[in-house]
Image: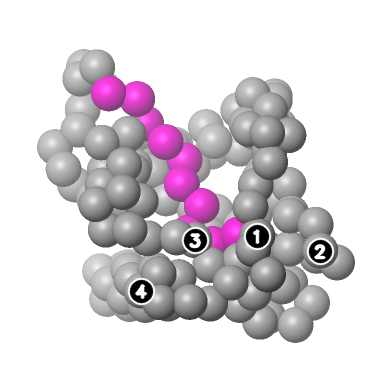
Amino acid sequence: MKYSKSEEYAKKLQTTEWMVFRKMVYVRDGYRCTYDCGWTKDRDIPLVAHHKVYYMINGEFVEPWDYSLDDMITLCQTCHNIYHIDFGYDMPIIDKNTNKVLNEDEKTRRTRLAIEEMKRKEKSNA
């Protein structure tokens, strides 16, 4: 089964709910790219609040702002593009009721393993 986000999802990223949640992610991360690429506010590259994983409940995507901050990271647009395009990572989609990955293939497996590695690094740096 192929899972994809719709144009409706893109519209949700223009809502007040998303803007408020996105700002919480930026504040937590000190308005910096968490890949430490050297991004600063004076550079003309936007920040992105990036979901590490997507959740579904009863076949519907969870609202983009209804996530734990632990499921989010701040990236600059350049690093976000590298993450998806250059690394070829595709976000795991997890059924919240069963905790099962719904779209596990080689691409999402690589992403899941990269996320697990990030979490290990975050814990060791804390």
- Is residue 54 left or right of 32 when viewed as pictured? right
How many neighbours does mark 1 have within 10 angstroms: few (below 14), some (14-19), or many (20 or more)? few
Tell me which residue sits at (49%, 61%) in the image.
91
Which residue is nearer to you in this view: 15 or 91? 91
Position of residue 84 measured from the top left corner of the image (x, y, whole percent): 35, 51
In whole angstroms, how far apart are the C-alphas of marks 4 and 3? 10 Å
Q: Are marks 4 and 2 in contact (CB under 8 Å)?
A: no
Q: Which residue is mark 1?
A: 3
Element type where label 1 sits in the image = loop
Against 101, is 90 above or below? above
Distance between the alpha carbons at the discs numbered 4 and 2 = 24 Å
Q: CA distance from mark 2 to mark 3?
A: 16 Å
Residue 52 vertical placement versus 21 (above, below): below
Residue 52 belongs to the span the image colors magenta: yes
* Viewer can see residue 15: yes
Q: Which residues are magenta?
A: 45-54
Q: Position of residue 99 (x, y in %)?
A: 68, 80
Nearer to the camera, 96 or 74 = 96
- Is the image coloured rainbow, by chain, by secondary structure, or in one colour? one colour
Which residue type does callout 3 highlight? Met
Residue drawn where x is 73% and y is 34% of the image: 8
In what element is the residue under mark 3? loop
Q: Is residue 27 left or right of residue 53?
A: left
Crowding near pointer 4: few (<14 within 10 Å), some, many (20+)? some
Quarter of the image that includes the N terminus: bottom right
Residue located beneath label 3 in the image: 91
Q: Residue at x 61, y 77 (%)?
A: 101
If you read the primary sequence from the N terminus, does the residue marked by circle 3 or circle 1 appear first? 1
Label 3 crowd bin: few (<14), some (14–19), many (20+), radius 10 Å:
many
Q: Quadrant of the C terminus?
A: bottom left
Q: Which mark is residue 59?
A: 2
User: Label 4, on which residue?
Assistant: 110
